[in-house]
């Protein structure tokens, strides 16, 4: 594999973490903590950030499975495959990353369990995805009427080995870059939804 292809791969793999959670860092978000580890085969990530948007709006955006590309730059297309009851859903996202004119595409299918009362969970469906496995846990909590705290921890196994001397720093850099991009887009996506937020904190449903 050409080394020039590694940045594109890095953008794709970090997208596995960003698909379902609008968790990121930007000038518009106050970051409490971000940790990224990579051992050439497995990525581990821990996040604890505050986003400048109300919790109902953040949740609305994060769980809008058919429009994930509005926030996450790696997603070229996404859709809900099916609801499975009790807050469970299977979701597909087509990812595409490019650098220096070299592009790579990847399919990611995940089973998501949404609890609405605490920690949520997502797991890759290996038979339908281009990665070996992943598991993440996250929660979305309102800090005040205008800010939301998002916490995330998890891992992904890439299914292919990237040489450590080149792969490790590059992967960490690309993950942080994608986190920052997604944060700004998350907060921007919340702006047009603000008129739908009622005084009681619930979203008004328009027909």
Image (cartoon, helix red, strand yellow):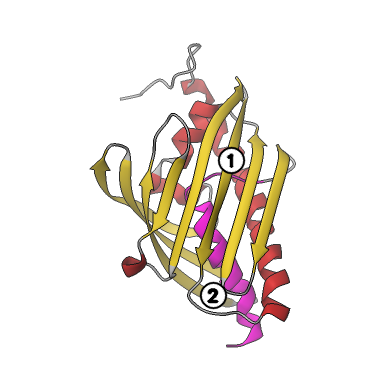
- The image quadrant of residue 144 is top right
SS type, badge 1: strand
Identified at 69% across, 72% down, the residue is 168
Relative to 152, residue 145 above or below: above
Residue span colored magenta? 1-24
Considering only order in the chain, which callout, 2 or 1, is on the residue closer to the N terminus? 2
Name the quarter where the N terminus is drawn: bottom right
> What numbered label is drawn on residue 151?
1
Q: Answer with left or right where residue 126 lies relative to residue 18.
A: left
At x 45% / y 34%, what residue is drawn? 60
List x then y, in percent, for residue 180.
67, 50
Q: State the predominant SS element of the stretch in magenta.
A: helix
Horizontal and vertical percent for residue 194?
53, 25
The residue under the point 47% across, 41% down is 62
The residue tagged 2 is 103
Query: Does dot 2 land on a helix, a strand or a loop?
Result: strand
Compared to 46, does 53 lie above or below?
Answer: above
Q: Nearer the viewer, residue 39 or 28?
A: 39
- Residue 181 part of the magenta segment: no
């Amino acid at each position: 594999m050409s080394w020039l292809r590694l940045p594109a791969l890095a953008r794709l793999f970090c997208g596995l973490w960003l698909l379902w959670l609008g968790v990121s860092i930007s000038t518009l978000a106050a970051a409490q903590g971000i940790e990224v580890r990579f051992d050439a085969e497995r990525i581990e990530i821990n996040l604890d950030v505050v986003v400048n948007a109300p919790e109902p709006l953040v949740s609305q955006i994060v769980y809008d499975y058919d429009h994930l590309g509005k926030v996450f730059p790696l997603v070229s297309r996404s859709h809900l495959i099916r609801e499975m009851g009790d807050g469970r859903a299977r979701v597909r996202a087509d990812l595409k990353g490019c650098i220096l004119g070299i592009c790579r595409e990847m399919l990611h299918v995940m089973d998501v369990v949404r609890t609405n009362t605490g920690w949520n969970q997502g797991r890759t469906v290996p038979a339908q995805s281009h990665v070996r496995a992943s598991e993440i846990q996250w929660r979305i909590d309102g800090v005040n009427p205008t800010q939301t705290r998002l916490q995330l921890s998890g891992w992904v196994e890439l299914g292919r080995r990237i040489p450590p001397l080149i792969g490790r720093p590059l992967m960490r850099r690309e993950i942080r870059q994608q986190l920052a991009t997604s944060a700004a887009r998350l907060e921007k996506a919340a702006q047009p939804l603000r008129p739908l937020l009622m005084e009681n904190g619930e979203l008004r449903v328009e027909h």
